[in-house]
Image (tube, helix red, strand yellow):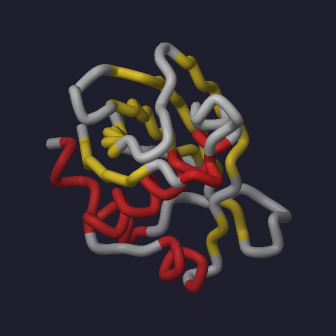
């Protein structure tokens, strides 16, 4: 299993009038954490796109347990629980506050697609090389 933690601080513009993070912003938080988790293993989304592969989100589920608020420092724990063997990659994500309380759970499924989005593709070999050591 591969795991990476990303931190970010809730900005004022991400909250509603009650200073609670607007629910739609969690998709962006998850994206930031996914991008950083891949960068951490040595490959960027930009490099994957330069290989002619796009990664559209095809499924997103979020469970809200507790609110995050303006100026909270959040930790997003991102996991890839199994090495992709086909055109899919799944990220399990958890959001914690500074006290270590679990706030939100998410699961995001993406497909490896050709750049023109015409067909599914396999995971790029370089990404497979970078992730494989975590699944031995």
**Residue projecting furthest to the bottom:** 50
The residue shown at (49%, 14%) is: 65
Q: From this viewpoint, which residue is outermost toward the top?
A: 65
115 vs 107, left or right, is right
Q: Residue sitting at 42 percent across and 47 percent down?
A: 71
Instruction: Give whichever of 54, 68 is nearer the camera.
Output: 68
Vertical position of residue 95 compared to residue 78: above or below: above
Residue at screen point 22% across, 27% down: 99
Picture coordinates of residue 69, whole percent (x, y):
49, 35
Please state, as top left, top right, bottom left or bottom right, where the C terminus lies in the image. Answer: top left
Q: From the viewer's perspective, is 114 left or right of 5?
A: right
Q: Nearest the camera: 12 or 21?
A: 12
- Left or right of 134 in this view: 70: right
* Residue 50 place in picture, x, y as percent: 58, 85
x%, y% of residue 41?
A: 26, 65
Question: In the depicted view, which residue is nearer to us: 87 or 93?
Answer: 93
**Picture quadrant of residue 72:** top left
The residue sitting at 58% across, 40% down in the picture is: 26
Q: Quadrant of residue 1?
A: top left
Q: Is residue 122 above or below residue 99?
A: below
> In this rendering, is residue 129 above or below 88?
below
Indicate the position of residue 37 as horizontal and vertical percent values. 34, 57
Count of marks placed on residues? 0
Q: Nearer the viewer, residue 106 or 123?
A: 106
């Amino acid at each position: 299993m591969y795991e990476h933690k990303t931190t970010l601080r809730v900005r004022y513009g991400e909250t509603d009038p009650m200073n609670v993070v607007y629910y739609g912003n969690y998709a962006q938080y998850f994206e930031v954490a996914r991008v950083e988790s891949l960068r951490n293993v040595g490959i960027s989304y930009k490099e994957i796109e330069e290989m002619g592969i796009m990664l559209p989100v095809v499924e997103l589920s979020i469970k809200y347990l507790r609110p995050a608020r303006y100026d909270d420092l959040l930790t997003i724990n991102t996991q890839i629980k199994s090495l992709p063997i086909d055109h899919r990659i799944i990220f399990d994500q958890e959001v914690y506050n500074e006290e270590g309380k679990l706030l939100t759970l998410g699961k995001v499924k993406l497909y490896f697609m050709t750049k023109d989005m015409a067909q599914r593709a396999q995971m790029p070999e370089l990404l497979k090389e970078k992730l494989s050591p975590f699944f031995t």
